[in-house]
Amino acid sequence: MIPAVHPSSFRLHPLIHMIKFKDIPFIAKRRDSRAVVAPTALALVAASYSEATWVRLSFDRAISIGAINPFEITVRDGSMDGQIFVGVSAALISPVMVEILLEAVEPFSDEYVALYATATTGILAVNNGGTWAGVNELVLPFG
């Protein structure tokens, strides 16, 4: 034999059709007073070139070359040697200057000497990790 279903003892009064709750006022979240500041990009302030040997880059603040990729830096020398040179190694000359040693990779004929560097050179600012965006056809010497 199946027991009879017992109705719930909780019942609303027949005159109550709806329960209305009082609105809860908005509680604003406390904002962090320490705003996140994005690193400022490095700025190239000077670049010099020694024919078929090296290119020196000077920046607006101290740099780190621990992750440098010198192959991303090239010099097109059409007026002196008629070659395209690619970076093969790098050395920190001062806290703000790096020297990239160059090696010829192919002939080039034009009337100018220009620096090319991608954004993936790996040159970083020491203080905040800002990166260098690189340059495209920067006539040397610069600055």
Image (cartoon, helix red, strand yellow):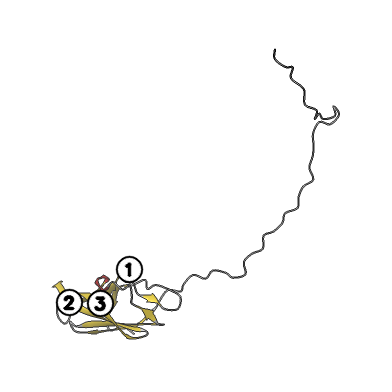
Q: Quadrant of the C terminus?
A: bottom left
Q: Hey, which quadrant is residue 16 in on the image?
A: top right
Residue 107, x across and y down, in percent: 13, 72
Q: Position of residue 81 (x, y in %)?
A: 14, 80
Give the mark nearest the N terminus, 2 or 1: 2
- CA separation, marks 2 and 1? 19 Å
| Residue 108 in sight in this render | no
Give the SS element for disc 1.
loop
Visible residue check, residue 133: yes
Residue 14, image x, y percentages: 85, 27
Q: Is residue 63 left or right of residue 106?
A: right
Against 104, residue 8 (above or below) is above
Identity of the residue drawn at 70% across and 15% down: 2
Q: Quadrant of the N terminus?
A: top right
Q: Amino acid at mark 3?
A: Ala
Neighbor class of circle 2 (other Cα within 10 Å; few <14, some 14-19, many 20+) is some
Q: Quadrant of residue 132?
A: bottom left
Front-lying residue, 10 or 44: 10
Report the disc number at residue 103: 2
Label 1 or label 3, whichever comes before in sequence order: 3
Label 3 sits on residue: 114
Residue most extreme to the bottom: 94
Judging from the image, what secondary structure is the residue with disc 3 in? strand
Q: Which residue is mark 1?
A: 120
> Among all residues in the image, which is located at the extreme front?
1
- Disc 2 marks a residue whose amino acid type is Glu
Which residue shows up at 86% across the image and 29% down it?
15
Whether residues under marks 3 and 2 lie with C-beta atoms below 8 angstroms apart, the answer is: no
Q: CA distance from mark 1 to mark 3?
A: 18 Å
Above or below residue 23? Residue 34 is: below
